[in-house]
């Protein structure tokens, strides 16, 4: 799928998620800022096209960039490393459109065969990782994993 396709689908997907989860700032003056973040997220997985220029073996539709790896790690870091509830809230608001964009990209890549480089079940990979990248699910998993991790970290 072309970049403009990912962009349009990413923004629509983000706005839909906002509606469904009744996130308040829909009419906020910050909305254009959040829309831009959702566009960045919707284009992010294809960063493999840029990386490919330096590392030929990396390949397009790479299973690292086309996955829930970044969403889950960023969410885990926020909940594990930060204590300030308000700061976590703000970061979640900023991360929400980015993750919505990534998730929409993975679902949109299902069109045209759903191939992922080096994987046989590319379609399933995209569906599972697209779902795991959904912001609310990613935050939920990150919060639970951080509760498991924190006791271990405090002993270090
Ligand atoms: Zn892609």
Image (tube, helix red, strand yellow):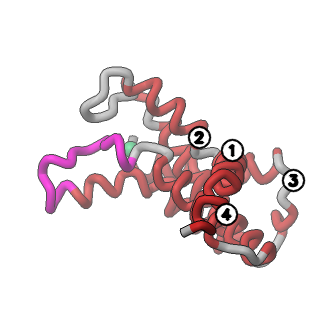
Up-down relation of residue 101 to residue 107 (above or below): below
Q: In this view of the protein, which residue sits in the foreground, 33 or 44? A: 44
**How crowded is the residue under tag 3: few (<14 C-alpha within 10 Å), some, or many (20+)?**
few
CA separation in Å, label 4 and label 1: 14 Å
Instruction: Count every numbered label the image shows and give the total.
Output: 4
Q: Where is residue 66? Give x, y as percent.
A: 41, 44
Secondary element at tag 4: helix
CA separation in Å, label 3 and label 2: 20 Å
CA separation in Å, label 2 and label 1: 6 Å
Marks 1 and 4: in contact by CB < 8 Å? no
CA separation in Å, label 3 and label 1: 16 Å
CA separation in Å, label 4 and label 3: 22 Å
Report if residue 60 lies within the magenta region.
Answer: yes
Earlier residue among tags 2 and 1:
2
Report if residue 141 lies within the magenta region.
Answer: no
Residue occupied by mark 1: 137
| Residue at 70% over, 55% down | 147
Secondary element at tag 3: loop
Residue occupied by mark 3: 22
Mark closer to the observer (3, 1)? 1
- Quick one: quadrant of the N terminus? top left
Give the extent of the magenta segment: 52-65
Residue occupied by mark 2: 132
**How crowded is the residue under tag 2: few (<14 C-alpha within 10 Å), some, or many (20+)?**
many
Q: Where is residue 130? Give x, y as percent.
A: 54, 38
Earlier residue among tags 4 and 2:
4
Question: Which label was assigned to residue 118?
Answer: none
| Residue at 76% over, 77% down | 84
Q: In this view of the protein, which residue sits in the foreground, 154 or 46? A: 154
């Amino acid at each position: 799928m072309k970049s403009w396709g990912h962009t349009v689908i990413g923004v629509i997907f983000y706005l839909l998620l906002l509606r469904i989860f009744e996130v308040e700032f829909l009419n906020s003056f910050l909305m254009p800022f959040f829309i831009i973040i959702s566009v960045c997220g919707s284009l992010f997985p294809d960063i493999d096209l840029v990386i490919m220029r330096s590392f030929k073996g990396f390949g397009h539709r790479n299973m690292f960039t086309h996955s829930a790896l970044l969403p889950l790690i960023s969410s885990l870091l926020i909940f594990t490393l930060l204590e300030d509830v308000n700061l976590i809230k703000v970061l979640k608001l900023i991360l929400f459109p980015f993750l919505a964009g990534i998730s929409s990209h993975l679902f949109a890549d299902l069109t045209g065969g759903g191939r992922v480089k080096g994987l046989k079940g590319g379609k399933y990979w995209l569906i599972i990782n697209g779902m795991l990248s959904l912001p609310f699910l990613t935050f939920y998993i990150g919060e639970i994993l951080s509760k498991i991790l924190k006791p271990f970290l405090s002993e270090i």
